Image: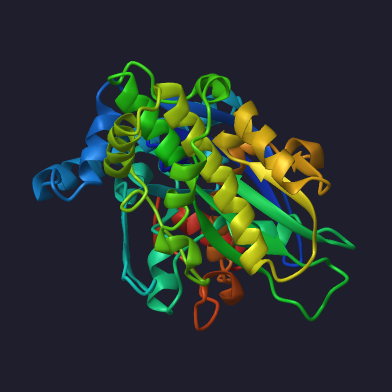
Amino acid sequence: MKIIGLISGTSADAIDAALCEIEGEPPHIRARILAALTVAYPDGFQARIHAACMPAHSRVDELCQLNADLGEQFAQAALRVIAQAGLEPGDIDLIGSHGQTVWHMVEPGGRVTSTLQLTEASIIAERTAITTVSNFRPRDVAAGGQGAPLTSYADWLLLRHPEHWRAVQNLGGIANVTFLPPIADTSSDPLALDTGPSNALIDGAVTEITGGVQHFDHDGQMAAQGRVDDEWLCALLAHPYYQRRPPKTTGRELFGAEMAAQLVQEGRARGLTDADIVATLTMLTAATIEDAYRRFAPGPVAEIILGGGGSRNPELVRLLRARFDPVPVRSHEDIGLDSDNKEALVFALLAHETWHHRPGVHPALTGAQHASVLGQITPGANYADLIRRTWCGA
């Protein structure tokens, strides 16, 4: 099947779109990316998303309009990746849309009670004429799970090593890890959790420091010029989230722009330079990842695979390699997977599994009571034909 995966991540700066070809069924499922692109939002759109993620600034009328406007943006991204591949919308079977997370409701004890992703699937299906699977996370939450990290199920399907334990470490806005037992181990379960902030606090601090002129630390240059404040770092590591046992997830509702602004003020009050602040927050990401492995890894990790935007930050990667030495820290590209487009591939893969009425999650990864078929299906113009071809064997 040819399926488009669409996602706007925690940074909310663009839509990742990947046109994928997916075949087979677990445990023998094959997925490859045929075309991919990143579509930046129009000026001011990221600020609208960030405002929607902050209760003090969010309004129900703006949420309503943002949901529709995101649908239009996602539909255009899908049409652009189809054109890039030299295909027509009629050549595509499904779209898997993650949408844009604006809130992930986590109780103080760690239980997730609700999760909200905006992006109107009806608009995507209407503009593209392609049947769209969306809103993946709530079903897992309803089954008692965290609703995240959903990328971990794709890791389970695609990235297990034949002989040793792997840690697949995503460095998005939030850092999450999947601990994968080897294929030869038929008794161990995987484990997934959000380790804490990755780019969210770094990006937020850089945005605050530069007055919005710069939104991320390009190539880790600012962090590389700074000095880590070890005393402040120790205080930051005392945050209760890091001690909480899995399953656990978090997001910008905790480690977001508001916290980043507060930390910039706190760092300046300590007499730190702007570079020192970014260096300390970059080290915080590395330190919390290492701490999570030490506390929670269910097996001896022999290899770490990095993905996500933070894997393009040389200073963050250097810090991780130093902390985990002699365990090799590799990239997704080193094992034949495109890191930049992995998350979009994940939601194409989950749409494939949903369409074939198969679970899109392993309960050991999210803490759910059972595995669930995820998402909601919005018919496109190809819906009846797709049913005939894939469900009826015609």
Relative vertical location of residue 36 with respect to residue 113 in this rendering, above or below? above
Direction from residue 157 to residue 383 in the image, left or right: left
Direction from residue 302 to residue 81 in the image, left or right: left
Image quarter where the C terminus lies is bottom right
Where's residue 13, x and y in %?
39, 31
Direction from residue 37 to residue 25 in the image, left or right: right
Where's residue 136, x and y in %?
44, 61
Q: Nearer the viewer, residue 129 or 366?
A: 366
Q: Quadrant of residue 154?
A: bottom right
Where's residue 86, x and y in %?
60, 24
Q: Residue at x 70, y 75 (%)?
A: 189
Q: Residue at x 46, y 23 (%)?
A: 275
Q: Quadrant of residue 15?
A: top left
Task: Evaluate whether residue 131 shows in this view.
Answer: no
Relative vertical location of residue 190 with respect to residue 178 in this rendering, above or below? below
Relative vertical location of residue 80 with respect to residue 173 in this rendering, above or below? above
Q: Residue furthest bottom?
A: 369
Task: Evaluate whether residue 289 shows in this view.
Answer: yes
Q: Nearer the viewer, residue 67 or 207?
A: 207
Where's residue 179, x and y in %?
69, 62
Q: Nearer the viewer, residue 282 or 271?
A: 271
Q: Nearer the viewer, residue 239 or 133?
A: 239
